[in-house]
Amino acid sequence: MVRHLIPEKRELFLNTALRLFAAKGVSQTSTAEIAKEAGAGAGTLFLYFPTKQDLIHALILRIGRDISAEINSRLKPELSAREEFFAIWQASLQWLLANPHAYQYVQQVRDSGMIAPEVVAESNAFFAYYYEAIQKGLSEGSIKAYPVDFIGGFLYQGIVVCVNYLRTSPQALPSDEVIQMGFQIFWDGIKSAKE
C-alpha cells in the first residue's frame, strides 16, 4: 500500500519541531514529543522525516528559503552596494525579529556541527545575494578588498548583535534606530576611503 504524504502534515511537523526546538533545545526534544505535540504517532512523523536529523535539515533549509525570499524581494539591480547591503541588513533583522523561533533554532544549530556539510552547501546557495552585494561593492570600489567570507561573517554577526539587543532591550531604542545604527557600524567597517 502506497501512502500519500500530505504537505500540510509535513508543515505541521516542521512548525511543531521548530517551536519545541526553540523552547527546549534540539538535543532535549525527542521525535516522540514532536509527534505527540503535532497530534500524530511517531510512525506518522517518520513517514515524513525518517530521522530526527532529516527534520533538523529540513528546518534549516526551510528557514534559509523563507528568509532569502524576503530579502530577494527587496533587492533591485539598480541599488548601489551600500543600498543593497542595507536592504539585506534591514530585511534580515525584520524577518528574524518576526520569526523568533527560527532565530533561536538557527542560533542553536548554525555552528554546532549538527548540519551535514552537503546541507550547509545547499543552504548557502540561498544566500548568493551576500556574495553578489560584496562583488558589487568591490566592483564599485565602495568597499575595502577584505576576504569575502570575512565580510559575510562580519555582516551576519552584526545582524545577530542587533537581534539580540532588540530581543533583550526592546525599550532601550526604537528598532528602526537600532537597525540604522547597527548598519552604520557595519558599513563604516567595510566602506572604502572614497566612500
Image (spheres, rainbow, N blue to C red):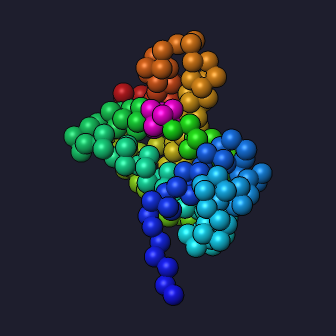
Where on the picture, by quarter, is residue 74? Answer: top left
- Tell me the residue at 26%/37% (across/down): 79
Nearest to the observer: residue 129 or residue 19: 19
Q: Quick one: which residue is furthest to the top in this view?
A: 172
Q: Is residue 162 visible?
A: yes
Nearest to the observer: residue 36 or residue 98: 36
**In this picture, residue 193 sits left or right of residue 74:** right
Q: Is residue 17 above or below residue 146?
A: below
Q: Main secondary structure of the magenta part?
A: helix
- Tell me the residue at 51%/45% (across/down): 152
Nearest to the observer: residue 96 or residue 141: 96
**Is 156 in the magenta?**
no
Residue 91 placement (x, y as % from top left): 40, 36
Q: Is residue 60 visible?
A: no
Q: Is residue 174 above or below residue 11?
A: above
**In this picture, residue 52 sits left or right of residue 156:** right
**Is 96 in the magenta?**
yes
Q: Quick one: which residue is furthest to the bottom in this view?
A: 1
Residue range highlighted in magenta: 92-98
Q: Is residue 164 above or below residue 3?
A: above
- Tell me the residue at 48%/15% (across/down): 174
- Tell me the residue at 46%/43% (across/down): 145
Residue 168 placement (x, y as % from top left): 64, 22
Q: Quick one: which residue is furthest to the right in this view?
A: 28
Figure disc tally: 0
Where on the picture, by quarter, is residue 143? Answer: top left
Q: Quadrant of the C terminus?
A: top left
Q: Is residue 28 above or below residue 47?
A: above
**In this picture, residue 155 sits left or right of residue 141:** right
